[in-house]
Image (cartoon, helix red, strand yellow):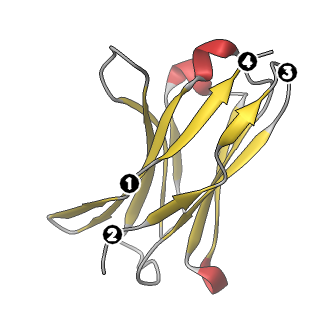
Amino acid sequence: QLQPVESGGGLVQPGESLRLSCLTARRMLSSTIVGWYRQAPGKEREFLASITGGPRTKYADSVKGRFTISRDNSKNTVYLEINDLKPDDTAVYSCLDRRGSYDYWGQGTQVTVSS
């Protein structure tokens, strides 16, 4: 299986933090790009952040300062930490593992922010 596997979602209260994990099938190479996206009900999928094997990071303007992407090469895992969660953060969060011209999507993990 080459698809990544996400975990760490759940039901949280506004203001709390959460760390999502994306376990990739293979170790990251310098050319690998792993990104986090989310899709809320009735909305299009939205890019959040990405990290390369370099590593270089990139963030959507809407999440800068509140979301942090990082990786642990020893575990083939990329993390997305989300602070000060808001109800608008409710969505399915998915991981994309890009290897050259091939894209591998995970199944996603649900994050629900509600009091």
Between 17 and 50, the residue placed more toward the observer is: 17
Earlier-in-chain disc, 1 versus 4: 1
Disc 2 secondary structure class: loop
Pick whichever of labels 1 and 2 is earlier in the sequence. 2
Distance from the alpha carbon under mark 2 to that under mark 4: 30 Å
Separation (CA) of disc 4 from disc 3: 10 Å
Q: Position of residue 115 (x, y in %)?
A: 81, 15
Q: Residue at x 76, y 42 (%)?
A: 18
Comes first in the chain, label 2 or label 3? 2
Q: Are marks 1 and 2 in contact (CB under 8 Å)?
A: yes
Q: CA distance from mark 3 to mark 1?
A: 26 Å
Which residue has dot 3 on it? Answer: 15
Vertical position of residue 86 compared to residue 28: above or below: above
| Label 2 sits on residue | 3
Residue wearing tag 4: 114
Q: Are there few (<14), some (14-19), or many (20+) residues within 10 Å of tag 4?
A: some
Give the residue number, with chain letter if any, for mark 1: 107
Is residue 93 shown above or below 108?
above
Mark 4–mark 3 CB contact (< 8 Å)? no
What residue appears at the point 72 percent right and 28 percent down from the top-left corner?
65
Circles 2, 3 touching at the beta carbon (< 8 Å) = no
CA gap between label 1 and label 2 equals 8 Å
Q: Earlier in the sequence, mark 2 or mark 4?
A: 2
